[in-house]
Image (tube, rainbow, N blue to C red):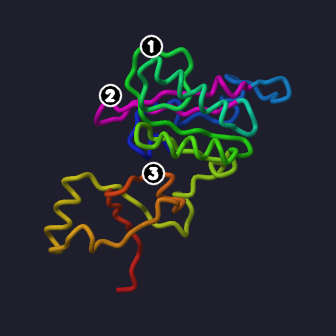
Amino acid sequence: MCHDRGYLVTQDELDQSLENFKEVFGDRPSERRPARSELTILVAHNDDPTDQMFIFFPEEPKIGIKTIKAICTQMQEQNITRAIIVVQMQEQNITRAIIVVQVGMTPSAKQAIIDMAPKYTLEQFVEAELMVNITEHELVPEHVVMNNDEKAELLARYKLKESQIPRIQLSDPVARYFGLRRGQVVKIIRSSET
């Protein structure tokens, strides 16, 4: 998912087999191998190395407001604006994070994420949502996130205003997968009968 969003992920990580993953991190969850905290990663964007994002796997099955507040306090102390949970970070400017939870979040934790939205980009996924890459499903057409230049070219080519472009819901599974924000345009490539 990080690679599809344009973040730097090593080829070794992309090609890693399940057996290799088990060798590195273990395959005994009852013994906390792999420990979810070991799976936390920090990635930088291809185009802008200062645009960094954390992917965090909390140990708790269900995240509550206490965990969110502790995370936010730690983020403020470290001047991090693109992460939600930080593991001993030096001064970094991170404002974007993905939280992968086992079961879900309490309503108060969800509200805390909404409250942090102006300052931080926080996304939450349940593990089951990431078991399959939905963009590789045969019924899901190819989606390409357009940059600002491509968007301007599209609007000029078809003489459109931004308000005339069809909308995609922020809760759409593919929009969530790509981490789309308001104002971004996606080119959907599908076969046509004509």
Identify the residue position indicated by label 3 in the image.
Answer: 178
User: Is the residue 102 above or below the residue 22 in the image?
Assistant: below
Q: Which residue is at 79% across, 24% downward?
A: 32
Residue neighbourhood size for the residue with mark 1, other residues' Cα within 10 Å, grouped as few (<14), some (14–19), many (≥20): few
**Cα separation between marks 2 and 1:** 14 Å
User: Is the residue 186 above or below the residue 88 in the image?
Assistant: below
Q: Are marks 1 and 3 in contact (CB under 8 Å)?
A: no
Closer-to-camera residue (38/119): 119
Q: Which residue is at 54% across, 34% downward?
A: 55
Residue 149's disc number: none
Give the mark, 2 or 3, whose residue is nearer the N terminus: 2
Which amino acid lies under the numbered mark 1 shown in the image of this protein?
Answer: Gln
User: Does residue 56 belong to the magenta stretch?
Assistant: yes
In which quadrant is the C terminus drawn?
Answer: bottom left
Magenta stretch in the rendered image:
34-58
Q: Which residue is at 59% across, 38% downward?
A: 99
Identify the residue position indicated by label 2 in the image.
Answer: 50
Give the mark, 2 or 1, whose residue is nearer the N terminus: 2
Q: Position of residue 26 (x, y in %)?
A: 75, 25
At numbered mark 3, what does the secondary structure look like: helix, strand or loop?
Answer: helix
Q: Is residue 37 left or right of residue 86?
A: right
Closer-to-camera residue (81/41): 81
At numbered mark 2, what does the secondary structure look like: helix, strand or loop?
Answer: loop
Q: Is residue 63 left or right of residue 133?
A: right
What number of labels is visible?
3
User: Is the residue 63 above or below the residue 125 in the image?
Assistant: above
User: Does residue 191 belong to the magenta stretch?
Assistant: no
Q: Is residue 81 left or right of residue 99?
A: left
Residue 90's disc number: 1
**Cα separation between marks 2 and 3:** 19 Å
